[in-house]
Image: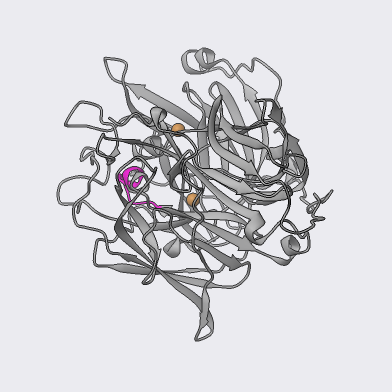
Amino acid sequence: MLHTLQLAPFVDALPLPEIIRPTLQNGHHSLTLTMQEIHAKVHRDVPATRMWSYASSGAGTGALAPLIEARSGQTLQIRWVNNLPAKHFLPIDHSLHGCGPGVPEVRTTAHLHGAKTASKDDGYPEDWFTPGHSRTCTYPLQQEATALWYHDHAMGINRINTYAGLFGMFLLRDQAEDSLHLPAGKYEVPLILYDRDFAADGQLFYDVSGDPQSPWIPEFTADGVLINGKIRPFFEVEPRLYRFRLLNTANSRFFLLSLAGPSGAVQSFTQIGTDQGLLASPVELKRLILGCAERADILIDFSQSAGQTLHLRTGAFDILEFRVAKQPAAPTTTSIPKTLRTIERIPESSATNTRTLTLHEYQDNAARPMVMLINRKHWHEPVTETPKLNSTEIWEFVNLTEDTHPMHLHLVRFQILDRRPFDKTDYLINKKLRFTAPAATPDPNELGWKDTVQCPPGTITRIIVRFEGYPGKYLYHCHILEHEANDMMRPFEVIA
Ligand code: C2O
Ligand code: CU
Ligand code: CU
């Protein structure tokens, strides 16, 4: 194994993705993204690593998939081309649902996470296609500005497809956002965070259980923290306000982010947006926990830090070095708006149905996690969640495990109502719900629109959802990719 913790930190500049803006052709905006095998350097001292990535037609061989920038309300067509090799280079677990004999090794679907998309274009896990094939999907983008992201969703293997590198960022813009005059251009910077382990020769390492019949492991967190494709890079900034678009694409890792000043003292930053767009007003933070698939839109003001060095951290570990120049390139006046937009809270009374969804982990005789389920049901069992189109429902996730699960629903955005701890033993043994503390309202930086929610252990997390958009089959799942594969993922169907 490569000891990534011993690699010299901050020797590579932070890479920035190529930005692609869809071009107007025959009345609609379209673009092509090709999945292909690439070799890219994750660090100065590590030989090039084999990965899979998306590239815009013709160009682009970097580790970072292009950043798509689109306007809200402009229908976009993406042609997803699978040009991957026929053999996978990471360990497939053939005992998992959808990975049995006769199923091709390399399969992909492309899902635009956070987009309000018709079911047939949403990248349903079983809608996979093999190398040499392509799919064209239509994204109406009838939704507000935010950071979306695209990633693989192929049944049973998306955790290794994503680990191989099949993910990218997507920024959706609208007029409401434009009118705020937030830092833009080179002052708006995507930060895509994830973790990887490497073998001594620099090749990606993904762990297995040790049982060749079922190599699946319940979680995977690696030592090497990458941002935009590099291990612990540096970034040169000017002493002024910056906007950072954070996205956690890690399989299992949550990032506990903070900003450390030159002496190590914690400095605050400002969160202005979450998964589904801007918050109502800015929230000053010292610490931000970014779960798998979550996004955070943050502002950092370097104007008082001219000539200094600051670090972005996860826990106590520095992952990105900011080197602040002595002078701004031009005089700047950008400031943080006091209000960002109006967000009306959905009244609980508008919900016509409440669904209780229990989260379970089952262990084998040696106390090893074997399978994780929602409501004790596997993916392939018949649909049980059938909300009506345009109805409002409360979904409560009853977490009976030891982990925090980042639960994600396709198609919709939602608001978090509250979280309330309860006694798991009473619930499981005596079939009695006994709360052990009052319900806690979400933190101020969670009061916006979300599509992924952290559900802590021994807690009931309630969200309120309006099922707008399209009728059809969708899914919801834990975004810890190992959990999702086995089998913490269920369909739901919106009924017209
Ligand atoms: Cu990030 Cu099922 O999605
Ligand atoms: Cu999604
Ligand atoms: Cu989970």
Q: Where is residue 247 in the image (x, y as percent from the top left)?
A: 54, 46
Instruction: Name the residue rendered at 58%, 59% in the picture.
Output: 171
The magenta segment is 152-160
Figure check: 181 above or below 463: below
Figure check: 33 above or below 87: below
Quarter of the image with the C terminus in it: bottom right
- Horizontal side of 338 relative to 107 (left or right) equals right
Residue 346 in view: yes
- Horizontal side of 171 relative to 379 (left or right) equals right
- Horizontal side of 478 relative to 445 (left or right) equals left
Q: Indicate the colouring scheme.
A: one colour
In this view, the residue farthest toward the bottom is 26
| Residue nearer the viewer, 287 or 358 | 287
Q: Where is residue 449 in the image (x, y as percent from the top left)?
A: 66, 48
Place residue 310 in its image quadrant: top right
| Residue nearer the viewer, 231 or 9 | 9
Q: Where is residue 151 in the image (x, y as percent from the top left)?
A: 42, 53
Q: Where is residue 179 in the image (x, y as percent from the top left)?
A: 78, 63
| Residue nearer the viewer, 234 or 402 | 234
Task: Examine the structure image and report whether residue 157 is included in the region drawn in magenta.
Answer: yes
Residue 451 in view: no
Task: Examine the structure image and report whether residue 364 is included in the region drawn in magenta.
Answer: no
Place residue 53 in its image quadrant: bottom left
Quarter of the image with the N terminus in it: top left
